[in-house]
Amino acid sequence: MNRTAETDIPPGISDSAYNDSSVSELVSEIKPRYHIAGTMGVYFDRPPYVNPEAAHVTRFIGLAPVGNKDKQKFIHAISPTPAYTMSALELCQKPENTTLFPYSGTEKTVTTEGPTKRSSESDSDGQYWRYDVSKKRQKHGDGDGNKLCFKYISSGSCPRGEKCYFQHDEDAREQSLRGVCYDFLNKGRCERGPDCSFKHDLQEGESSSDRKSGPRRASSMRSRECWFCLSSPNVESHLVTSIGEHYYCALAKGPLVPHHVLIIPVEHSPTTLLLPSECESELSRCQQSLETFFKNQGKEAVFFEWVFKRSTHANIQSVPIPSSKASAVQKIFTLAADKLGFKFQTLQVDNKYERRTSLRSHFDPNCSLFYVELPSGVILYHVIEENEKFPSQFGREVLAGLLNMADKADWRNCQLSKDEEIKVVESFKKQFEEYDPNR
């Protein structure tokens, strides 16, 4: 490890001592959140450092030998939170004492001639770091040969070819192209649950007779699979608060705040921006009703929609915030965008109907999009590039920060029992009754 900032290395110990090139290369590849070692024989809690091409920081802890005469720490307790349970904003947080990436010479290690040289194919995709070290286990039939090759599933080709340790399964690729979740295909499960934008069951291929049946069959299949289609067995109907001709409202699963409402199209559509124009007047009435309801409680409504081009069913999230915080909404969204490395485009049109009409004119159905309607009437929107990593819960995470509720940024931390959900829904329906445009 080569020091890039002043650290508290114990006296007499060089930070480059015992620098193992293999370990340096491995750590620079895997980018762990915690790295614990005892090689140098001293206790050393290094400031966290950033990793190239990774959002999180790494914390290095060196431990002294057990029972050492200087009574330095030889045991250190940590309480790591699984990354999949953390929000993108939590993973991106960097302490004030964070330093630059401390390892140098790793590129040289990769290209050095001799028996330790890695093939150029292994450098082509960082997805394989977990498995490069398993080559010996593979030879003994102890590897992960039953796992799918992410590169092949996502692109249809793999630079490793026959040397790849993982399955190039054409059927799995076909399922992926039909929108089935990669984790579901690879592991048989997906921890994201309803938060995942992909399907969690295998899809049947279309025969010529299926194609002739056209939209009716497709609609029937969607209704069975979708979390939000009212005819689906998966829909949680006890959360529904109001049903109109084109839209219905439901309280959010794992709500950020008690009156966190979803506005959901009755028709199965990946975004509200693709629905016929006659649907807009009903959506406008619904939003105005929620705005009036929240205003009478001293709150303002923030509406946002994440339009993912592979999404199955659109929903607009409506989150009430204290009126005192309304002026800060645009600033906090702008700051969050800066941290992720993009800039919002701005739309400011007085008429709400014309505002969304203008937004539709900027929308490309072939791209993903995030937009938020602020209490001030401004719309912030961002067109998401094909390979851009954009957190699916971005809107919720930003508002959780605004409301000082970082622990509630992930809906899974806010889940209620079904009985509790029913009580919350009944209470909301009673309070909202006089504002409900569908009653």
Image (cartoon, rainbow, N blue to C red):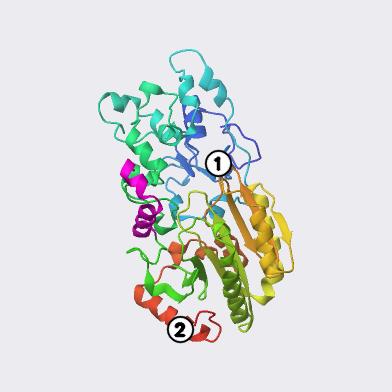
- The 10 Å Cα crowd at callout 1, few under 14, some 14 to 19, many 20 or more, is few
Q: Residue furthest left?
A: 141
Residue 386 is one of the magenta-drawn residues: no
The percent coordinates of residue 90 (x first, y second) are: 54, 55
How far, Cα to Cα, is label 2 from label 1?
44 Å
Q: Give the range drawn in magenta.
A: 205-226
**Relative image position of residue 9 (x, y in whole percent):** 58, 39
Q: Kindly report the secondary structure that dominates the magenta region of the rendered protein.
A: helix
Give the residue displayed 36% in from the left and 45% down from the top.
211
- Looking at the image, residue 375 sits to the left or right of residue 139; the answer is right
Q: Which residue is drawn at 33% across and 41% down?
A: 208
**Callout 2 touching callout 1 (CB < 8 Å):** no
Say left or right for 242 vs 298. left
The amino acid sitting under disc 1 is Ala
* Mark 2 neighbour density, 10 Å: few (under 14) some (14–19) many (20 or more): few
Query: Which quadrant of the view contains residue 226?
Result: bottom left
Q: Reading the chain from its start, which is encountered first: label 2 or label 1?
A: 1
Q: Position of residue 60 (x, y in %)?
A: 51, 42
Q: In this view, does 137 lie to the left or right of 389?
A: left
- Helix, strand or loop at label 2? It is helix
Residue drawn at (52%, 21%), measured in percent from left and top? 109
Residue 18 vertical placement versus 42 (above, below): above
Residue 330, percent across and down? 70, 63
Tell me: 190 left or right of 73. Answer: left
Residue designated by label 2: 427
Q: Please name the residue shown 47% across and 69% down the image.
A: 252
Picture mark count: 2
> On the image, numbered disc 1 is attached to which residue?
54
Q: Which of 88 and 280 is in front in this view?
A: 280
Residue mark closest to the camera, 2 vs 1: 2
